[in-house]
Image (spheres, rainbow, N blue to C red):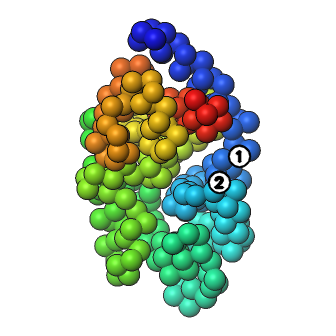
């Protein structure tokens, strides 16, 4: 395919998959349970954090987590104290355990009390060409209160060459307004043009087959290369193609 044909093909796939039907099988269904901005961004962040492995397991554990939080994540975060930590006893998703979760709640509380909330932290550090430096700065803010060393692994750092798939997915959810009812677009101070594709096995393999990506590893350098390719197809909304790449890989075995 030439560039025009490739764009037409991928635009068609975006329309096919960037649809409310997508929500039924995707972890994004959890933040869609809420309407309050803070509930959406907190639930979305926690669900994105555990979004690796079996999708059904992610959704089941995400639903369990929201139930533990009384299905009011913002209220729960703001009223959380150390004595409440026992409520997470036994919670585990892969290597993310009850101690990691307890810290995440305390760190979120710290951000809302002292940094103006999640959107403020990311928008303060966004740059003209990329949000990857903003993720790096967010991680520093998130871990500026006392924490277990083991918990740091649950937030990736693109400046250490991580693809940061889960947090890029979270940023897509918060920033991109797709007018289709999938992504939320509730963060108005960051341009969707700065978003990066949540690079995983599916999107990476399809991107390579379509010659949008040559690098073999799914790492930070691959994300940067894919950014360049997708922005040539749509500079204002490059990560809409995440739906096309993921859909082709996950559902069509392209």
Q: Image point 48% across, 76% down: which residue?
A: 100
Q: Is residue 2 left or right of residue 93?
A: left
Residue 86 versus residue 197 in the image, above or below: below
Mark 1 Cα shell of 10 Å, populated few (<14), some (14-19), many (≥20): few
Question: At which x and y percent is residue 178?
Answer: 57, 31
Q: Nearer the viewer, residue 240 or 199?
A: 199
Identify the residue under disc 1: 25
Q: Image point 56% across, 69% down: which residue?
A: 94
Residue 71 versus residue 181 in the image, above or below: below
Residue 134 versus residue 156 in the image, above or below: above
Mark 2 and mark 1: span between their CA atoms?
A: 8 Å
Question: At which x and y percent is residue 44?
Answer: 57, 55
- Residue 153: quadrant of the picture: bottom left
Q: Image point 47% across, 68% down: which residue?
A: 108
Identify the residue under disc 2: 55
Mark 2 Cα shell of 10 Å, populated few (<14), some (14-19), many (≥20): some
Question: At which x and y percent is residue 120?
Answer: 39, 53
Question: At which x and y percent is residue 163?
Answer: 37, 49
Q: Is residue 26 visible?
A: yes
Q: How many marks?
A: 2
Q: Is residue 63 left or right of residue 233?
A: right
Q: Which mark is residue 90?
A: none
């Amino acid at each position: 395919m030439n560039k025009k044909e490739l764009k037409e093909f991928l635009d068609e796939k975006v329309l096919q998959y960037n649809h409310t039907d997508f929500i039924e099988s995707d972890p994004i269904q959890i933040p869609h349970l809420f309407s309050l901005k803070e509930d959406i961004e907190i639930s979305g962040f926690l669900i994105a954090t555990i979004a690796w492995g079996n999708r059904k397991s992610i959704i089941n554990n995400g639903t369990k987590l929201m139930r533990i939080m009384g299905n009011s994540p913002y209220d729960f975060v703001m009223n959380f104290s150390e004595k409440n930590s026992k409520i997470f006893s036994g919670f585990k998703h892969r290597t993310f355990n009850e101690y990691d979760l307890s810290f995440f709640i305390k760190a979120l509380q710290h951000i809302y009390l002292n940094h103006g909330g999640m959107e403020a932290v990311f928008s303060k550090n966004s740059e003209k060409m990329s949000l990857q430096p903003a993720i790096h700065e967010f991680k520093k803010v998130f871990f500026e209160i006392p924490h277990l060393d083991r918990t740091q692994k649950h937030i990736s750092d693109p400046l250490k060459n991580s693809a940061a798939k889960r947090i890029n997915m979270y940023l897509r959810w918060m920033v991109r307004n797709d007018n289709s009812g999938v992504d939320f677009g509730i963060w108005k101070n960051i341009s969707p043009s700065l978003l990066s594709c949540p690079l995983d096995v599916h999107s990476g393999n399809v991107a390579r087959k379509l010659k949008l990506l040559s690098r073999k590893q799914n790492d930070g350098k691959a994300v940067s290369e894919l950014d360049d390719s997708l922005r040539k197809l749509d500079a204002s909304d490059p990560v809409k193609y995440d739906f096309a790449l993921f859909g082709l890989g996950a559902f069509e075995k392209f």
